[in-house]
Image (spheres, rainbow, N blue to C red):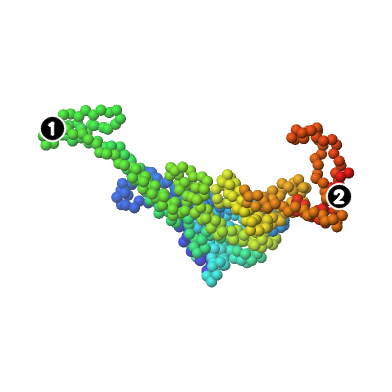
Amino acid sequence: MNKDLDRAYAALRAKKRTLDRYFSYYDGTEQTPVVSERLRETYQNIDFSINENWASVVVDSMADRINLEGVKGPDAKVQDALDEVMRATGLIIEADDAHEAALIAGEAYLMAWKEDDGDVECYFHDPRMCHVFYDEANPNKATFAAKWWEDETQCHIKLFYADHIMLFSANRTSSGEFADSDVFAQVSDDEHRYGVIPVFHLRPHRRAAISELRNVIPIQDGINLMLTNMFVTGEFSAAPMKYVISNAEGLEDLVSAPNRIWTIPAAGGLDGGSGAQVGQFAAADLGNYLKAVEHSINALSSITRTPKHYFDLGQNAPSGEALKVMEAPLVKKVKERIARFEPVWKKLFVFLCKLQDVEVSERDLTLIWSSPETVQPLQEAQTTKAKADAVAAKKEIGISVRQALRELDYTDEQIDTMEAEQASQPAADGATGNALMSALSKGPPGKPAAPKAAPAEPTPAQGVPAAPPVLPKAVGSATSTGLPRPGPLPTVRPVEASGASLSQDGASAPNTQTEVA
C-alpha cells in the first residue's frame, strides 16, 4: 500500500467535516443548536428556525477588499504570456473564489497544468478536496499534494509531486459512500519536467488552517438561539393573557378576540363571599432578547475587527475621517491577508509562464491589488493636497525634487518617465508638465519663493553697452491705462554677448543684450 496515499486519505477525511461546518455557517444553513433539554421538549413541534447570518458579513467585509487586479511582468514577452493565460483561464474570477474560501476554511488551493492539446489551465479548488503536505524539517517546503473526487461509479485520488503525478481509483461502496483507502488501486504514474508541485496553497495563517469563522460560530449560535427564543416567546406570551376567577358556569366559552365582548354571569366567589374577578397577565417583554442580540453583535464586531456600521445597528453611516478610523482595524487585517497571499500568487504566475516556456523570476513580478480602503474622492483629494504641501515645505531643508516626488509615492521609474516626457515636450506643454515640480520648487504655500538673482551686468571689458529698457510694441492708439500711445517705436533686436545665463526652464542659453536701431 502506498504510504502517501494513506496519509492523503486520512488528512482529507479528517478535515472534511470541520470544513463542511464552516461553509454551512457562511451559507446560513447550519441548524441552531438547543442547549437545554427543557427547550428541546418545547421546540420539538416547532417547524421553523431563525438564522440571522452574521458569519457571512464578517467574511464578505474582508473578501470584498481583497481584489487581485492583475500582474506586471519585467518585459513585453513575459507580460504577453501573463495576459494571455489570465484571459484564457479567467484567473481574476478564480482569484475571488480562492480568497473567499481561504477566509472561510482557513485555506484554499489553486491548480495549474498544461493539457494535452497545449492549453494552459488554472482553477480554484475547494479546500475540502485538496491537501498539501510539508517537510517537517522545512515547513515552507511542500513535499506532495493530494486531491480526491468522485464520479457516478468511482472514487479517485491523485498525488502530485515535483516530478511525477500518480492516480489511484476505486469503486464506490454499495451505500454510495467514498471508498476506503485500502481498496484503491494505482491507475497511472506520469512523469513531468517542470520540477514544481502544480498545487498552490493559499493560507491566511502559516502555522495552521485557521478559519475567520472560528471565533464567530459560538456568538452566531447564541444570536440564533436568542432570536428563536424570542419568536417562541412571542408566540405564547407576546399578547396579554386574561383570566376570570368565578364559580359561574359557561366560562369555558369565553374567547379572547378583537371586538369580542365578554358577558360574565354574576356568581358568588369560590369562598361564597366575593363576586367574579377578571384580570390579565402582562405581555412578555421581547426587548430583553433584542438587547442580548445587540450585545452579541457588538462583541462580534470587536472580536473580528469588523466595523459596527457593517451590522447596521441603527447608527448613522459614518464618513470622512470617522469612517477611516472605524475601518482602520479591518483594513490592517486585510493588508495582512494580502501579504500572506502574494508570495503564493507569484509562485503560481512563475509556473504559468513556465508552462508556456517563458522564464521569469518571482522578484521581477509586481502584483496589482485594489486598495483595501474605502474610496472617498473628496477626502482623498484633500489628503493628497495636504501631503503635497507638507513635502513642499521640506524644500527649505534642501531635499531634491526627485526625493520630494518619492515622498509623494512616485516610484523612480515613474519619475524617470516624467522627466523624459518633460524633456521631449514642446515649451507650452512643458510649462504644464512642470506644474508639480514648480510648485515643489517654490516651497510651502503661503510663503513667497526666494527671489531669483539678477543677471550679472556685463563688464566694460566685454565691450557690450548696457541694454536700454524694453519698450512695448505699438498696438492701437491707447495703452491699457487709457493714455495716448507715442508714435512709431524704434526697432529693437537682440545682440548676442559672450557668456551664458540660465533660461527659465533651467537650460543654458546665451546672454543677449538689446540694440536700438
Labels 2, 1: front one: 2
Q: Residues within 10 Å of mark 2 (few under 14, many from 20)?
A: few
Q: Are marks 2 and 1 in contact (CB under 8 Å)?
A: no
Q: Which residue, given by chain and number where applicable, does mark 1 sit on?
A: 268
Residue 243 on image: x %, y %: 22, 36
Element carrying mark 2: strand
Name the one closer to the observer, 488 or 501: 488
* Residue positioned 26% across, 32% down in the render: 255
Name the one closer to the observer, 92 or 513: 513
Q: Which mark is residue 494?
A: none
**What type is the residue that disc 2 sits on?**
Val
* Residue positioned 72% across, 46% down in the render: 432
Residue 142 on image: x %, y %: 57, 66
Q: Residues within 10 Å of mark 1 (few under 14, many from 20)?
A: some
Residue 289, image quadrant = top left
Residue situated furthest left in the rendering: 272
Residue situated furthest front in the rendering: 460
Residue situated furthest right in the rendering: 517
**What type is the residue that disc 1 sits on?**
Gly
